Amino acid sequence: MQVYVGAMVVLVLCGTLIDVIHKRSAKYFFQHRQVVKSRATRQVTGGEVIAAAAGTIVVTGLAAGEFCNPWRRISHLLLMYGFLLYVITTALLVYVYPTSATPAPAAVSQLWHLGALLICLGGYWFWLLLRVDVAAEGHPRFALVRADLFIVSLLASATCALLWSLCQSAGHPLWAGALFALYIIASTVLFGSVPWSKFAHMFYKPAAAFQKRIEQANGYRRNLPPPADRPATFGSARRAPHHY
């Protein structure tokens, strides 16, 4: 298991590097930073940089402030903190308490189960109730696209982990073995599909949010076209659609 977890870490690092090279994200950020510096109207102080970094960590990272929908934000926070608990406690169980000679404290095991439960709660809530394109665009509820690879494999990993633990505790070795195999397969897909899933977005989004705060501080303005004319109010006050 120590070799397997180490291999998953390598897969994430290599997958993120491949994703950065393929999408040229690092090149884009470097070029955009040069544009921002050339069009800035004032110099950002060191204190403002620290404040921007702190704001990015607290608002974008810890509080998921980029989500306007409060239910989507709660779902995301459940997934995020559940995933962190899940990964950290897995590392503790595998590397610090690997054998029966070094039994893990009950708190570590409980936090591992809590992390998996939070993933399931936030993930299934999002998948079954909050997917924005189901009703709005008329897609089938359970239609899968490549963008769903991360959330589906994460849910499969956490679900199989909980069921495996339940069967193991209940004394069903055959079911426990089958579920453990599914758990390993789902986890391998989760950490091995970084170049094709949204896994790498968790690294991009904080960087983009920090850059946006720096742009706001130095007075940079994007060259965007003016917004199109829209009605001042929405809902019942909107003009009725025309049928041609």
Image (tube, rainbow, N blue to C red):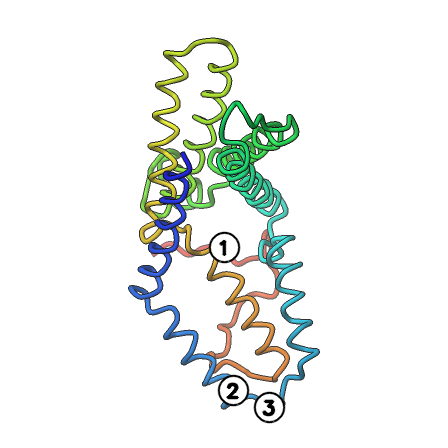
| Labels 3 and 1: the sequence-earlier one | 3
Whole-percent x, y for residue 212 in the image: 56, 72
Which residue sits furthest top?
A: 171
Whole-percent x, y for residue 172 in the image: 43, 9
Report crowding for label 1: few under 14, some 14 to 19, many 20 or more residues within 10 A (C-alpha). few
What's under tag 3, amino acid-wise? Thr
Instruction: Give the residue number, with chain letter if any, for mark 3.
Output: 41
Task: Establish if 55 lies above or below 191.
Answer: below
> Residue 21 is drawn in which quadrant?
bottom left
Image quarter of the C terminus: bottom left
Whole-percent x, y for residue 13 in the image: 38, 55
Q: Are marks 3 and 2 in contact (CB under 8 Å)?
A: no
Q: Residue at x 60, y 47 (%)?
A: 73
Instruction: Give the residue number, with chain letter if any, for mark 1.
Output: 240
Q: Nearer the viewer, residue 144 or 188?
A: 188
Q: Secondary structure at mark 2?
A: helix
What's under tag 2, amino acid-wise? Lys
User: Disc 3 or disc 2, which is closer to the eye?
Assistant: 2
Instruction: State how far apart marks 3 and 1 are (Cα).
Output: 44 Å
Which residue sits furthest front?
A: 101
Instruction: State how far apart marks 3 and 2 are (Cα).
Output: 9 Å
Q: Is residue 44 left or right of residue 101?
A: right
